[in-house]
Amino acid sequence: MPKVRLLSGRILAEKILEWLREDAPYGDATTRTLRLQGVCAQLIIRAKTGGVAACSSELAEALQTLGLRVEQVIESGKEFSEGDIVMALRGPAEDLLLLERTLLNALAYFSGIASATRRLVNQARQVNPRIRVAATRKTPPGLRFCAKVAFEQGGGDTHRWGLSDTIIVKDSHVEVVGDLEEAIRRVLERKSFVQRIEVEVSKPEDAVLAARLGVDIVMLDNMSPEEVRKTLRLLEEAGLRSRVVVEASGGIGPWNIATYAATGVDVISTSYPFYHPDRVDLSAEMRRVEC
C-alpha cells in the first residue's frame, strides 16, 4: 500500500511541476535576485471563505514527494470555515515563493468545484435520495484528474474519466455511422465482456430502442423534464425500465436539478461545477523560520 501512495504522489508531483513551468519557465526572477539560498520559510494557506476542501490531501502527498514538509492540512472532502488553515508547509523559501500562487489557485479552484458539487447533490437528494450526480468530461485541459477528484469529494460521481474507460455512443457517432440501431449493433458485437455500453438519445422512442437492443445505460440528452418522464413511462410499459440505468444530461444546474431528480432518473450528469465553481477565497502567509 505505501508503494501505491508513493506512486500516486509522484504522478501528481509531476503535474505540479508542469503547472510551475507554465508560471516560471525560466525560474522566479524576483526570488533569484533576492539571494535566498539557505533561507527557510513556512507557507500558511488560510481560508477567507468557507468551502469543501478538495485535492488537499493528494496535493499534500505530492508536495512531500517534492521534498516539502506538510505541517497541517484539512483532509480532502472535509468542510472548512473562514479563518481555518487549509494547509501549512515548511521548506526552502525559494521553493515556497515559487509555489505560493500556483498552489493557492489550484486549491481554490478544486475546492470551488467540490463546494458547488455538494450543493447540487444536496438539492437533488432532497427529492430523490438515491440519485447520483455525475461529472461530464468538460474539464479544463490538463486538470482532468484533480477536477474529477474534486467533484467526487463534493459527493458526486466521476462518471467516465476519459474516452478509454467506457463505450458511450453519442450523436456524432450515430451521424457518422448513419443509423442508431446499426451503431448500437456494432459496439455490442465488438465490446469486451468487461465493458458497459451507454447510448445518448434525444427522443423517448430511441431510448426504448436502445434498451431493447441490450445497452446498459441510456443518456437522455437535453430532454425536458416532461420528456424524461415520458421516456421513463415508455420504458416501464415496455418492461425495460429495470434493465437500464437512465441518465439525464444537458443544461442541468442549481436552477433545475431538483426538478430533474424528481422525475425518477437514476443519474444526472452536469458540467456546472467545472464552469461555475463556488467562490472559495484563500490567502497565503509567508514566514521566515529556522531551517
Image (tube, grey):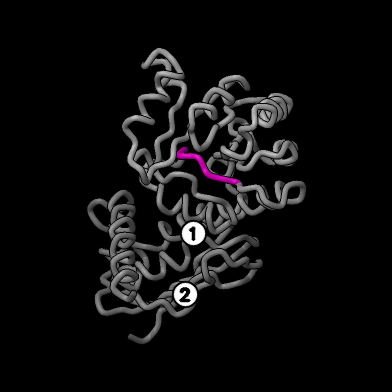
Label disc, if present, on residue 107 of the rendered structure: 1
State left or right for residue 227 relative to residue 246.
Answer: right
Give the quarter of the image for residue 182. top left
Q: Residues within 10 Å of mark 2 (few under 14, many from 20)?
A: many
Residue at left 63%, top 70%? 83
Q: Is residue 123 above or below residue 188?
A: below
Q: Earlier in the sequence, mark 2 or mark 1?
A: 2
Hey, which quadrant is residue 81 in on the image?
Answer: bottom right
Image spot of residue 12 (x, y percent): 33, 60
* Residue type for callout 1: Leu
Gap between marks 2 and 1 measured at Cα: 13 Å
- In front of the other: 15 or 196: 196
Quick one: SS at disc 1? helix
Q: Which residues are magenta?
A: 133-138
- When the figure is inspected, residue 242 is found, relative to residue 113, above or below; the finding is above
- The residue beneath circle 2 is 88
* Residue at 37%, 66% in the rendered image: 97
Residue 218 in view of the camera: yes
Residue at screen point 61% across, 55% down: 115
Image x and y of residue 241, in percent? 63, 35
**In the visual, does 87 lie left or right of 117?**
left
Q: Is residue 168 above or below residue 172?
A: below
User: Does dot 2 land on a helix, a strand or a loop?
Assistant: strand
Residue 277 part of the magenta-drawn span: no
Amino acid residing under circle 2: Ala
Residue plotted at (56% across, 37% down): 244
